[in-house]
């Protein structure tokens, strides 16, 4: 299974996990969709994995039913790992090789990228879009 297929499967599982949590908490998909001010038809397409679930909709639905979005994401990814095994991770390989990442402008490497990963300047913490292309 290639990375794109794996990502699409993960996206589908996010919708299905959310659907399961909605039902388990005694809600209907229609009630959650209306509470989140979304179209029930579109919401059902997202839940059933026919269309990728936007992160904003995941967050809105989770707030309606009282579940942390991270719980849904963790459950969905666990399903992918159980079915297809862990992903080969370039980030994990870099960590194994002793490459330490540094967050731009901070002394902590929590959530940092390895030094050998090319990240657009605007994606780094504290950067502005106007800084793109400028070197430090």
Image (cartoon, grey):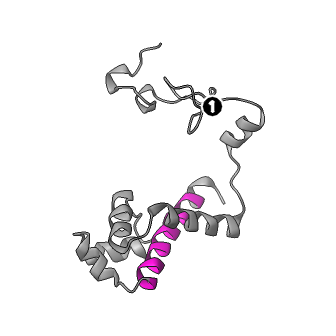
Q: Quadrant of residue 97?
A: top right
Depicted 117 relative to depicted 36: above or below: above
Q: Main secondary structure of the magenta part?
A: helix
Q: In the visual, does 83 lie left or right of 112?
A: right
Nearer to us in this view, 28 or 9: 28
Q: Residue 13: x and y, percent?
A: 52, 70
Does residue 12 belong to the magenta stretch?
yes
Nearer to us in this view, 12 or 74: 74
Q: List the residue tagged with mark 1.
A: 114
Residue ID at (40%, 64%): 53
Q: Residue 11: x and y, percent?
A: 49, 63
Q: Residue 112: x and y, percent?
A: 57, 34
Q: In the visual, does 34 lie left or right of 135?
A: left
Outermost residue, top direction? Answer: 136
Residue ID at (61%, 53%): 3
Q: What span is in magenta?
A: 6-24
Q: How many marks?
A: 1
């Amino acid at each position: 299974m290639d990375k794109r297929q794996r990502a699409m499967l993960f996206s589908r599982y996010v919708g299905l996990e959310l659907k399961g949590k909605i039902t388990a908490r005694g809600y209907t998909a229609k009630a959650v969709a209306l509470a989140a001010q979304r179209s029930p038809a579109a919401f059902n397409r997202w839940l059933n994995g026919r269309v990728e679930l936007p992160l904003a909709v995941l967050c809105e639905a989770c707030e309606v039913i009282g579940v942390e979005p991270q719980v849904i994401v963790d459950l969905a990814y666990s399903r992918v790992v159980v079915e297809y095994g862990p992903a080969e991770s370039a980030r994990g390989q870099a960590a194994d090789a002793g490459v330490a990442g540094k967050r731009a402008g901070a002394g902590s490497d929590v959530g940092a990228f390895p030094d050998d990963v090319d990240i657009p300047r605007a994606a780094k913490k504290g950067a502005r879009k106007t800084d793109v292309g400028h070197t430090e």
